[in-house]
Structures are given as C-alpha cells and as structure tokens.
Image (cartoon, rainbow, N blue to C red):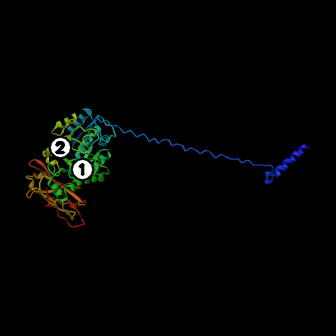
C-alpha cells in the first residue's frame, strides 16, 4: 500500500514539473550547467631559425707555385728560336718530371686561383702559341706520352690558312680530347699599336677604324669566333709577343677573360700576379737558360716582350715582310669567283724563284706561277671558285738565303660590284 502511494506521488511530480506555477509554489529552480570555455591555447614560440652551415670553401694551398712554359713550333731542320726540335722538346718534358713538377690543366690552375681547388706545391702549365700544325702532329703525341695536359693559344687569321697552319677540325679533335683552347688575338699584332710585331697593314687598319675598335676586334671578336667555331667558352688570352698596356688590360676585362698571359717567366702564386699579367717562360731553342730558370722557379724568359725573338725570325711572325703591289688589293672586295690573284715581289729583294710559294685560306698551297722577269707570282682558281666571304693570301720565299713571308686579305661578294681597297692597295 505504501509503495502505491509513493509511485503516485512521483508520477504527479513528473507530470507537473513543466508547469511554471508549480515551480513557483515549490520554489523549484533548475540548475544551469555552465561549461567552462577552454583555456586559451598559448601560441608556441617558434624555434629560432638556424641558418644552414655554410659549405666550407676549399682553402687552397696558397703556398703552391706554378710555372708556365710557352712553346710555338716543333720541327727538324729549321733554324729559328721559336722552333724546337722534337727530341729537345721531349727531353724538356722529362726534365719537368725529374725536377718534381706536376703538370696541371689550365682549368685546374684557374680553379686554384679562385680558391676552389688544391694543386700540387710545384705545378707547371704547358702552353703552345700561334696555331702551327706541328703542335697537333708532333707536340701533342709527345705530351700524350707523358700524360700532360696543355693549352693551345691560336690567332684567328692563321688557323685554316693551309701550309703549316692548324685547321679548325684538328682543333676540334684536340678540344674533344681535353686540350684547352685559348685566344691569341685576331691577327697576332702588338696590342700597343706600335713597335715590334706591328705591321703597316695593322697601322692602316687602326687609322681607318680607330684604336679602340681595332683592339676589340683583336681581343673580343677573336674570342667570339673561336667560341663559335668550337662551341666552347674561351677563358684565357695570351698577348701576342707579350706586348700589352692599360688599354689592352681594360679590354681583357670587358671581354670577360679569366686570365691573360705575358711572356716574362716568373713563379705564379695564388693571388699574385694580377689575373691579366700572369707570367710565362718563352722557351727558345737557342736559350736553354730560360728553361733552366723555369725549373728553378726564378724570374726570366724573354722579357716584357718577345721583340728579340721575333727579330731573329722575321718569317715566323706572320706579319708582312715587305710592301707589295697585290691583286686583288689588300682589303678590296671582288665579285668574280675566279679572279687572278697575284703579287709583285720586286720590293722583297733578290727572291729565289724556286722558293716562291703561295697559300690561300681555304685552298692551302696553290700551283702559282712565278715570272722571274717581272718578279710577279700569280694564280687563278679555275677548278675551285671562291665561296667564302674573306680570304688570306700568304706568299713565302727565300730572300738572300733567308725565308721571308708576306700576306694580305681580300673579300668576296658575288652579289655586288667589286669594291676597291680602302687603302692604297698594298700589302705592308
């Protein structure tokens, strides 16, 4: 009975729990449940940014020293300071090894100067100037025998001219084998614009276009041609004859060369001399002391310019030997693809008729005829007409028992009329 009463009371409370009146009567008050807001999350303090450790530079062995040797030509039977007999060249290569030198590449030398690479304490560089084919045919095989890297410095208007000049294809083969190719100017002239190794033809060109424009052709245009012909970046320049001045150094910087070389031998250090005055020993066949100085890493060589060397061998400078009357005239433009090419050699002196030889760029040695009475040598390209835009003609002959050489250039344009030479029509 009590259970029933309790259940009834509970049911009544539930039924009337929603009535406001009942709430007031019984003073019922619902409890509010307050949910506390979460405590604000503290913004984490970012960890300090730690910069990546700098990649340590290779600290080059700054006490190392480098000698640089300058050669030109390797042949038998030619009496010239610039011509080394192959056996003598091979002996010097052995002496480099015997004296404790390690022959390094040009790129290793440049990387060392940039503080990017170690090199042996006693290092040597081998360079060969001008672009004689004997460097390819004689010098290179000897250097291969010793495993020595080397650099070829070539000048534009000699490469591919036939005779004893190296070709672009041969240079490409050397490039593919790892030989460094550097620039030796456009026409191998004294960049001071005067003095030894500066021809009358060059003087006329300077007068015509201005010294600054001529310098840029010699040092910038030549670089671009080598890069275009061989698909490489040319990083180095060798001053012809070692002659340079402040203007030449300014163009070296403008052209973007990483190093430029003179011809006074010295020990080259990590930061000295300056990048555009790096010394080389000009090795001469008749001056063994220069090579001995190199092995001792003392100053020496042929001095600030190679004037004495070139004076001893005028035929080897590739400059012009005399003032000649030529046809086509020097610098002229012809439209005839089969012109008569000739020169009067009377101003050269007593020429040995049997020694007269004509070479033409793109042709090589041609079957030119020499008329002893008029002292005129001539050739007409009947079977192989002209095709290129410009040509260089090289005449060599013995005068008084000594070899002399002269050259001139002309242009070919089949689309237009012939254009006379800007100068007087003489090859200086």
Q: Is residue 373 left or right of residue 414?
A: left
Residue furthest to the bottom in view is 417
Residue 164 visible from this viewpoint: no
| Residue 192: image location, x then y, percent | 18, 50
Closest to the observer, 365 or 69: 69
| Residue 281: image location, x then y, percent | 21, 40
Q: Quadrant of the C terminus?
A: bottom left
| Residue 6: image location, x then y, percent | 87, 45
Disc nearest the viewer among 1 and 2: 1
Is tag 1's residue or tag 2's residue first in the polypeptide sequence?
A: 1
Residue 371 visible from this viewpoint: yes
Q: Is residue 169 left or right of residue 318?
A: right
Residue furthest to the right in view is 1
Closest to the observer, 283 or 362: 283
Whether the residues at callouts 1 and 2 have beta carbons within 8 Å, the answer is no
Residue under pointer 1: 250
Q: Quadrant of the N terminus?
A: top right
Q: Work out how far the residue at label 1 is from the one at label 2, CA to CA, in angstroms.
A: 18 Å
Circle 1 residues within 10 Å: few <14, some 14–19, many ≥20: few
Closest to the observer, 268 or 76: 268
Circle 2 residues within 10 Å: few <14, some 14–19, many ≥20: some
The numbered dot on residue 367 is none
- Write the residue at 48% across / 41% down: 48
Circle 1 — which element? helix
Residue under pointer 2: 304
Q: Quadrant of residue 100?
A: top left
Circle 2 — which element? loop
Closest to the observer, 199 or 419: 199
- Write the residue at 27% across / 51% down: 255
| Residue 177: image location, x then y, percent | 32, 44
């Amino acid at each position: 009975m009590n259970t029933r009463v309790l259940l009834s009371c509970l049911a009544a409370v539930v039924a009337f729990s929603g009535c406001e009146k009942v709430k007031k009567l019984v003073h019922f008050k619902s409890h509010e449940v307050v949910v506390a807001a979460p405590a604000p999350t503290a913004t984490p303090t970012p960890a300090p940014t730690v910069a990546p450790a700098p990649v340590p530079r290779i600290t080059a062995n700054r006490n190392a020293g480098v000698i640089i040797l300058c050669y030109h030509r390797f042949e038998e039977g030619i009496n010239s300071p610039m011509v080394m007999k192959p056996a003598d060249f091979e002996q010097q290569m052995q002496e480099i090894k015997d004296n404790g030198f390690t022959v390094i590449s040009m790129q290793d030398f440049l990387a060392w100067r940039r503080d990017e690479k170690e090199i042996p304490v006693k290092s040597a560089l081998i360079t060969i100037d001008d672009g004689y084919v004997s460097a390819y045919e004689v010098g290179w095989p000897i250097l291969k025998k010793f495993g020595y890297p080397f650099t070829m410095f070539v000048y534009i208007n000699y490469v591919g001219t036939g005779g004893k000049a190296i070709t672009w294809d041969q240079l490409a083969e050397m490039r593919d084998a790892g030989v460094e190719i550097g620039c030796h100017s456009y026409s191998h002239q004294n960049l001071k614009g005067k003095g030894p190794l500066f021809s009358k033809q060059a003087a006329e060109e300077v007068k015509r276009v201005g010294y600054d424009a001529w310098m840029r052709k010699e040092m910038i245009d030549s670089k671009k041609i080598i890069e275009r012909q061989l698909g490489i970046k040319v990083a180095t320049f060798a001053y012809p004859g070692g002659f340079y001045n402040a203007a030449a150094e300014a163009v070296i910087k403008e052209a973007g060369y990483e190093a430029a070389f003179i011809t006074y031998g010295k020990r080259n250090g990590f930061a000295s001399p300056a990048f555009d005055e790096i010394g080389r020993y000009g090795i001469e066949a008749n001056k063994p002391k220069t090579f001995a100085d190199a092995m001792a890493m003392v100053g020496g060589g042929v001095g600030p310019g190679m004037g004495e060397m070139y004076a001893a061998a005028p035929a080897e400078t590739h400059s012009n030997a005399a003032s000649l009357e030529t046809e086509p005239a020097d610098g002229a433009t012809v439209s005839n693809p089969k012109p008569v090419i000739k020169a009067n050699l009377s101003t050269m002196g007593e020429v040995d008729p049997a020694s007269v030889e004509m070479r033409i760029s793109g042709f090589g040695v041609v079957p030119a005829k020499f008329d002893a009475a008029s002292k005129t040598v001539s050739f007409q390209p009947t079977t192989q007409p002209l095709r290129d835009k410009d040509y260089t003609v090289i005449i060599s002959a013995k005068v008084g028992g000594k070899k002399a050489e002269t050259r001139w250039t002309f242009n070919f344009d089949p689309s237009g009329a012939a254009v006379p030479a800007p100068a007087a029509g003489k090859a200086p």
